[in-house]
Image (spheres, helix red, strand yellow):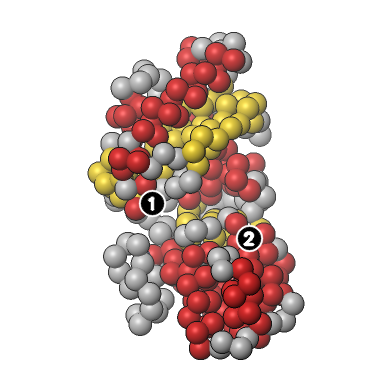
Amino acid sequence: MKNIIIAIDIGGTTVKIGVISHFGQIIKKWEVNSDKSNNSIHIIDNVWDSILKQLSKMNMEQDNVIGIGIGAPGFVDNKAGLVYEAVNLGWEMFDLKEKFREKTDLPIFVENDANLAALGENWLGAGESAENLIAVTLGTGVGSGVIANGKILNGCNGTAGEIGHVIVDQQGYLCNCGRVGCLDTIASASGIVRVAEEYIQRNPNSQLARMKQQKHDLEAKDVFDIAKKGEEVSYKIIKRALDILGQALAYSASVINPSRILIGGGLSKAGDFLLDMLKENFTKYALPRIGNQCEVLLAKLGNDAGIIGAAYIVLNKTDTHILI
Ligand SMILES: [Zn+2]
């Protein structure tokens, strides 16, 4: 009987893998390290070997699998199953679907990781099956997925909804997409740390500068933590990042008129501190008719959003009845 889905969420540090029921229940989940040697070519073998081992441990076979859903970072053409470019992994024109096709005859579906997180959250998380939704993942980078009229937006070559690469500061920092001043360079975890380093040089006597001296490796979480306590310099950094993010989300919302905007990823752990400031900024910049109808909420599924979304696309694209 075919009743399970293999869900794979490939990231720059780890690959999250799940065996998921067609109810979206995670039966088993685990991670393998992303081996980035030789342009990350070993990831495919490592992931596939660990899946076969796990299925065997569970007394299951490939015959039980409805399909495989795979999320990958970077620019992904979901129709071709091709990763145009994933800078963190060193992949360029990487034929991800074909690489798995060499391993198995099971149906394989590939999608951008942030799009999967949006689909996962909309199926079983904070989206609650919204017809129009923007899901933003504030992690190492700014990922985003857009659902419009009930469907994930892919665009003509899979690059729709890349809100992280909207240019918001022409005098800003170089982004890993090769351009200058993308939202990603300001509102991501690495962006916040980079801005903090700059502010520290200008404010060497600040509490933030002292924190950096003690910790050496300053993290975005540290900047949020002392901003919450009212430290002036870090508060300024967070305020600016969330102002710019609110503005970019308001622009995006004017295109799809979403009922919900979900904020996930590591930075969302800052909770209401982040959310309240972001809501205020979003409302400030959004057309009132759009802002009034749109709830800005924290995502609910955490790190599982990607694999839940991967299961969703398998069910959706194989026309398996989706149960909620
Ligand atoms: Zn960019």
* 186 on left or right of 86: right
* 3 on left or right of 76: right
Q: For numbered disc 1, what is the local secondary structure?
A: helix
Say if residue 111 shows up in the picture. no
Q: Quadrant of the N terminus?
A: top right
Q: Which residue is mark 1?
A: 88
Residue 27, image quadrant: top right
How packed mark 2 is, by other alpha carbons closer than 10 Å (few <14, some 14-19, many 20 or more), is many
**Percent position (x, y) of residue 68?**
45, 28
Above or below: residue 54 compared with residue 189? above
**Percent position (x, y) of residue 58?**
61, 15
Q: Which residue is mark 2?
A: 268
The residue drawn where x is 67% and y is 77% is: 227
Say if residue 300 shows up in the picture. yes
How packed mark 1 is, by other alpha carbons closer than 10 Å (few <14, some 14-19, many 20 or more), is some
Instruction: Inspect the image, locate mark 2, and give the three-letter code of the amino acid beneath it.
Output: Ser
Instruction: Inspect the image, locate mark 1, and give the three-letter code of the amino acid beneath it.
Output: Asn
The residue drawn where x is 35% and y is 21% is: 103
